[in-house]
Image: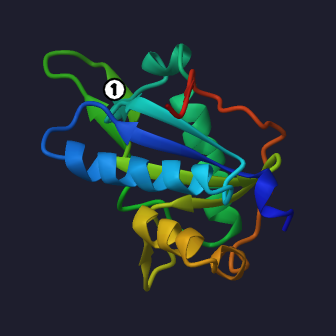
Amino acid sequence: MRSPPERRVELYLRGDTYGTYDAQQTVLSRVHSLEDDGTLADATVEADWQRVRTPEQDSRDGALATYEEFREWARRNSYSLEPAFQRRTRAYMGTDVVHDVVTFPVVSLAVYDGDDLSAVFPCADGDLNYTVQDALAAFEDGRIDEWLARFETVSVDRTEPLLELTAAP
C-alpha cells in the first residue's frame, strides 16, 4: 500500500431515491471528515448516481464503465457486488426491446491507492456483506491498511473518476 495521503475515494450517492437523504448525508459527512483530517488525499462525490442504467443511457456519464471496473475488482477477489448492485434484463411492454441494465445501490464507495482500485463497497464474499459504513469505520479507527489487505487491487490506469464528478464540497 502507498502512504495514506495518496489514498482517495469515490463516493456514489443515488439521486433518485426517497427516504435516504439523511443516511446519505451522514456518509458524506464522514467522508468529508476523513478528507479534512488528512486520512484521505481526495474524495469525489457523484450525487446523481441513477438507479438503473442501460448502455444507451450511459453514453454520457460512464456509470456502466465504472460498474465494469468494480465488477473486475470483485471477480479478481472472488467477491460479489450483489445484492447491492444487480445486473439483469429489462423488457418493455408492447415492444420487442430488451436491454441489459444495472441497478445501482443507494450508496457506494470505491477506495483507490493511486491508479489502483483497492476495494468497492458494498460487496460480499458469500458469507459476509461489507458495507460502506464498515469501510468508513476502518478508516476512522486507523485499521484501513489491515482491513484492505484482504483484497487484491486492480489497476484502472486512472486517477480521475470516469463519471462527470464534482469535487466533494
Closer to the camera in the image, 37 or 114: 37
Q: Secondary structure at mark 1?
A: strand
The foreground one among 76 and 155 is 155
Q: Residue at x 65, y 32 (%)?
A: 161
Q: Is residue 140 above or below residue 45?
A: below
Work out whether residue 7 or residue 157 is closer to the camera in this orientation and state it: 7
Judged left or right of residue 35, residue 80 is left
* Residue 13 relative to residue 165: left or right: left
Question: What colour scheme does the image use?
Answer: rainbow
Total marks shown come to 1
Q: In the image, what residue occupies the spot 46% across and 41% down?
A: 12
Q: Nearer the viewer, residue 13 or 74?
A: 13
Q: Answer above or below: position of 125 versus 97.
A: below
Residue 85 visible at all: no
Evaluate whether residue 47 shows in this view. Answer: yes
Rendering quarter of residue 120: bottom right
Quarter holding the N terminus? bottom right
Q: Would you identify the image quadrant in which residue 145 lies?
A: bottom right
Q: In the image, residue 18 lies at what x, y percent? A: 14, 39
Q: Position of residue 6 (x, y in %)?
A: 80, 52
Residue 152, horizontal then vertical, whole percent: 75, 69
Check the image and name the residue furthest to the bottom: 127
Residue shown at 44% from the left, 56% from the top:
30
Q: In the image, 52: left or right of 80? A: left
Is 120 located above or below residue 128 in the figure?
Answer: above
Q: Residues within 10 Å of mark 1 (few under 14, many from 20)?
A: few
Residue 54: name its quadrant.
top left
Q: State the residue position of label 1.
A: 98
Task: Point out the residue furthest to the front here.
Answer: 37
Amino acid at pointer 1:
Val
